[in-house]
Amino acid sequence: MPWLIDFAEASAKTDQLRSEKDHLFLLAAGLMGEAGSILSELKKQRRDSQLLSSSQEILREEFGDFLWYYVRLVSRLSPDLLPQLEQLADSSDRVEKSILPLSIEFANAVGTVMESVRYGVSDDSLSATPNHDLVRLWSRLKALARGVEVSLHEAAQKNIRKTTSRWPIERKYLPLFDEDFSEDQQLPRQIGVEFREVSCDGRLTVVLRCNGLNCGDRISDNIQTADGYRFHDVFHLAYAVHLGWSPITRALFRCKRKSITRIDEGEDGARAGVIEEAISALVFERAKRLHFFGNLDHVDYDLLKTVQSLVSGYEVEQAPMWQWEAAILDGYRIFRELIRNRGGLVRVDLQGRQMSYATFAVASHVAV
């Protein structure tokens, strides 16, 4: 069944590099990087044969990532070549070589294409890359994939699911997970939460207030060098807004889904809360090194992938990567305001999927 051209068309829609001046060189660099990832994973399989089953899924993803860069490169260098490659896509040539020689031949073919791009592309000419170099690489890729029992078609489908999860053509939020529950078991649809910074025994802490009442416990940074983590509850609010998920927020506002025990325990229980806190801490460590995502409009894929792996088995695993990215970036947008102004009022609108921030007069370290 033809699939390569369809995959090339889908890949073009998720190409976030196409507006860059050095688009072709970036694609070539990506191709080389993904080739290295395939070879690295094959080495791990050889070293840790007992991990073969889990490694095979990773390997399928690496082949899919390589395919993405390959079809984008072919589309730029020689788009008329794609139909020819399509005819070769289902070839079932026997593989009689072991994995190591196949890997070396694959790496060599990648290097040849890289050399062609290096010497064949100038400011005045897109490419002088010979088609036979691209065909040779395709042949070596197919041989290696067959040798390690990876279906290129399945790898391509996995890649499409991944890239559209991160960069969909249309951003449409999943329905809120608690829509079918009574109002008292739903996350608050609209609410304002005050983050008030106070000094307690010489330590800076944050108290949350809602409708004139304190909610939750006082929170300090819980680290020797202050870093602002005392305001981290804003991240839980961001998860509620952009994911419709936050066991911590449910506990805070006493809106767990008690009417169904398996949901109460399996989705809103302590373990889910621990995972949410772990995600907040994990992202925070990355954010500290990036000025809390100031002036950034994206979150790196590896971080999003790690976050998604942590929620495997929970309802929120359905959420695409772009929703996680929106939750993280929006949460840190508000977090930076809270740090700058040492508190403030955060309004959340789950139905509108929005968060807003407003300052209020903050007394200078009210001692309590």
Image (cartoon, grey):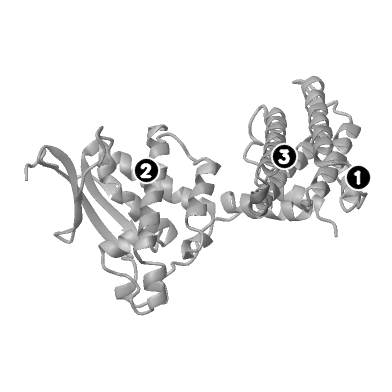
- Mark carried by residue 69: 3
Residue occupied by mark 1? 96
* Secondary element type, mark 3: helix
* Separation of marks 1 and 2 at Cα, in angstroms: 54 Å
Amino acid bearing label 2? Tyr
Instruction: Say few, some or many: other residues with alpha carbon within 10 Å of mark 3 (under 14 / 14 to 19 / 20 or more).
Output: many
Where residue 250 appears, x then y in whole percent? 31, 64
Instruction: Please identify the quarter of the rendering in which residue 103 is found.
Output: top right
| Relative horizontal placement of residue 166, taking residue 338 as reference (left or right) | right
Amino acid bearing label 1? Glu
* Secondary element type, mark 1: loop
Q: Residue at x 25, y 44 (%)?
A: 230
| Relative horizontal placement of residue 42, taking residue 116 as reference (left or right) | left
- Mark carried by residue 332: 2
* Separation of marks 2 and 3 at Cα, in angstroms: 31 Å
Instruction: Please identify the quarter of the rendering in which residue 126 is found.
Output: top right
* Secondary element type, mark 2: helix
Q: Nearer the viewer, mark 1 or mark 2?
A: 1
Q: Does 245 sit above or below residue 44?
A: below
Where residue 231 appears, x then y in whole percent? 27, 45
Q: Residue at x 64, y 34 (%)?
A: 19
